[in-house]
Image (cartoon, rainbow, N blue to C red):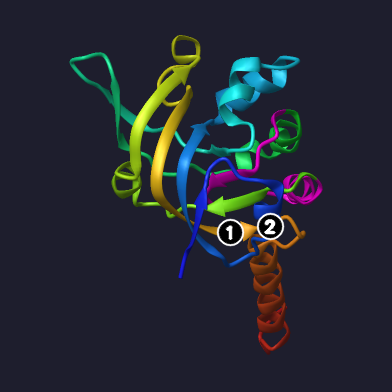
Amino acid sequence: MPKTLELPLSEAAVRALHVGDEVLLTGTLVTGRDAAHKYLHSVAHDARFDEMVRGRLLYHCGPVVKKEADGSWRVVAAGPTTSIREEPYEADTIEAYGIRGVIGKGGMGPKTLAALQKHGAVYLHAIGGLAAVLGQCVTRVLGVYKLEELGPPEAMWHLEVKDFPAVVTMDAHGASLHAQMEADSAAAARRLMENNPHRA
């Protein structure tokens, strides 16, 4: 059974999660891709972003959005983007803005894993290929930050979600499913090479 998590999250709630836990997220989160991370890394501190994301989750996502006749925004699709591109920035972003978790796909590296453990945060894997379904979990667009400067896919969208599904694949205890899978795959490849009588 998935665990229902209400955002914002406490550090204790995050440290109670472990790799393999399935979760349903309800509350508010913020999107941020490459341009957003580069921007945040270029400034000393951004108070508005801090207010939106502290204690919440940063979603590696460039949502497909539609502007309605009344001027409001609606999310059409909200699939995850590849997270490893943010590895140079993520640890610093987590520390500076009190982020309790990152959502994306593909996992992240050792620098981010160390930051998760130090600051009490998790990495949540969202399912790729389900952008339209995940978009239906967005109940409201609360606002958008840096839209003109970064453009719609790269802007920081402040979203309200309900029962957004994800899986913990990197936790606050130093465990990473991605690192374990990489190690297991490398070991399996070595065994195949060792057992191949025709190898050079």
Q: Position of residue 69 (x, y in %)?
A: 18, 15
- Disc 1 target residue: 168
- Element at badge 1? strand
**Residue 106 shows in the view:** no
Q: Is residue 36 above or below residue 26?
A: above
Give yes or no for residue 98 being in the magenta stretch.
Answer: yes
Q: Residue at x 54, y 31 (%)?
A: 33
Q: Amino acid at mark 1?
A: Val
Residue 113: image location, x then y, percent: 74, 51
Kindly identify which residue carries mark 2. 171
| 120 within the magenta span | no
* Region rendered in magenta: 97-118
In the displayed structure, 168 sits above or below 183; it is above
Report how far apart the C-alphas of labels 1 and 2 lie in the structure: 7 Å
Mark 1 near mark 2, Cβ–Cβ under 8 Å?
yes
In this picture, is 89 found above or below 70?
below
Left or right, residue 184 beside residue 140: right
Question: Is residue 191 depicted above or below 84 in this figure?
Answer: below
Report whether 129 appears left or right of 110: left
Amino acid type of the residue that numbered disc 2 sits on in the rendered structure: Asp
Q: Residues within 10 Å of mark 2 (few under 14, many from 20)?
A: many
Image-based side of 16 in relation to 129, left or right:
right
Tell whether 126 sits left or right of 85. Answer: left
Tell me the SS state at disc 2.
Answer: loop
- Tally of numbered discs: 2
